[in-house]
Image: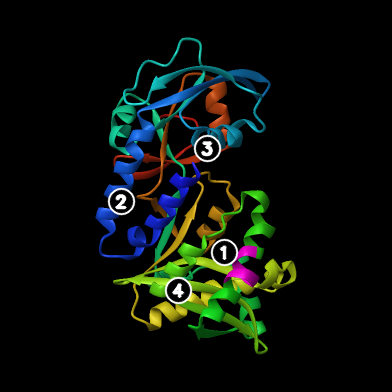
Amino acid sequence: MRSAAAIEERLLVPAYSSRWSSLTVAAHRMLAYPLQLRGPVRRRRVEVGGQEVSLLEIGRAKLTEPICTRLFGELPPPEIETSRSLRHPAEAPGGTDLVVAEVHRWVATRFRRAGWVVVPDRVRWQGELSALPPPVPSHSLKDDLRKVRSRGYTLEHATGAGDWEEFATTMVVPQAQARFGSEAWIPSPYLLRQFSERGRLHFVIRDGVRVGGFCSLRRGETVWLPLTGVRHGSPELLRDGVSIAAYALAFEWAKSQGCARVDLGRTSPFLHDGVQQYKRKWGLDPRPDPLAHLTAVWIRSHAAQLAFAREPVLIEREAGLWLYAGAGR
């Protein structure tokens, strides 16, 4: 699994910021296909709203368990069964309230047309720079922007290898670990080298000190901001609005460079995800991620629907992303 993750990481830059994007995405799907022909089976019984729900997972646990954990909390140990095909939507097993199956994007349409809900493991957030920040910001964002203006943050552009090392070790890694703990995604040295070779590095300055930063990669009129960080992951600097300043300054700089759109990376598909809510606050919109893996979900009980009513999720349909909250498909 580590080798698969390493391969995917090598595809990020060409998929999101090069003219070879479509070829890279196609390569990603070809590499994933052999891993998604059959999958291990795990059966559990969980509880939601005082009701017992029978749960069946088919496929790699790294794709099915995050959805199940989000819906039901800590999961009991599973009963392991014989592996099953992941290519054709079959009638949900008798007596099973919820089936969560890993599916390849090439066969997802079959499941969707058979009544399954197709959930991506992540979605991307993009927006038109002309509308960022939104002309009528929320009360929370208005207060944040006022704080940024009062602190006098400015932007500094840097290019040296030492600057990138400082950014990675004192900002990106500490903030990711402070925010996500053991679940934090830490970019590999290879990926950081790709960012430094193809992108630009920007520091947020206050009183002459580098307190935060972000890197940018441009493709046409779109600028992608794959990494941001706050020095030492400091809670005090976060409260002082350094991350808000990074976004605000990034948008101003991108506009001055003639960019029209911004890509602010990915989040989980669940509506109550804190990072997703933060990006919504800025006026960004969710879009399908071409590198996302998919799961197909079969829901056949009211109790299972209630789990999604409590944890609404963005799902992929023919026309793009839709919000699913436990009613309809």
Image-based side of 170 in relation to 65, left or right? right
**Mark 3 crowd level (few <14, some 14–19, many ≥20, 10 Å Cα):** few
Q: Which mark is residue 196?
A: 4
Of the residues shown, which amino acid type is indicated by label 2? Val
Tally of numbered discs? 4
Q: Is residue 62 above or below residue 129?
A: above
Q: Return the disc, 3 or 1, that comes first in the chain's sequence.
A: 3
Is 227 included in the stretch rendered in magenta?
no
**Helix, strand or loop for disc 2:** helix
Instruction: Identify which residue is drawn at 53% across, 46% down.
Output: 271
Instruction: Identify which residue is drawn at 59% across, 37% down.
Output: 70
Identity of the residue furthest to the top in this view: 94
Q: Return the disc, 4 or 3, that comes first in the chain's sequence.
A: 3
Highlighted range, magenta: 168-173
Is residue 97 visible from the viewing direction of this image? yes
Where residue 176 sits in the image (x, y, percent)?
62, 60
| 116, 197: nearer the viewer | 197
Cα separation, mark 4 vs mark 3, equals 30 Å
Of the residues shown, which amino acid type is indicated by label 4? Ser
Q: Pointer 2: what residue?
A: 25
Where residue 50 sits in the image (x, y, percent)?
68, 21
Q: Return the disc, 2 or 4, that comes first in the chain's sequence.
A: 2
| 229, 244: nearer the viewer | 229
Q: Is residue 29 above or below residue 246?
A: above
Q: Pointer 1: what residue?
A: 138
Labelled pair 2, 4 in contact (Cβ < 8 Å): no
Is residue 143 visible from the viewing direction of this image? no
Instruction: Identify which residue is drawn at 38% across, 49% down.
Output: 291
Q: Which mark is residue 62?
A: 3
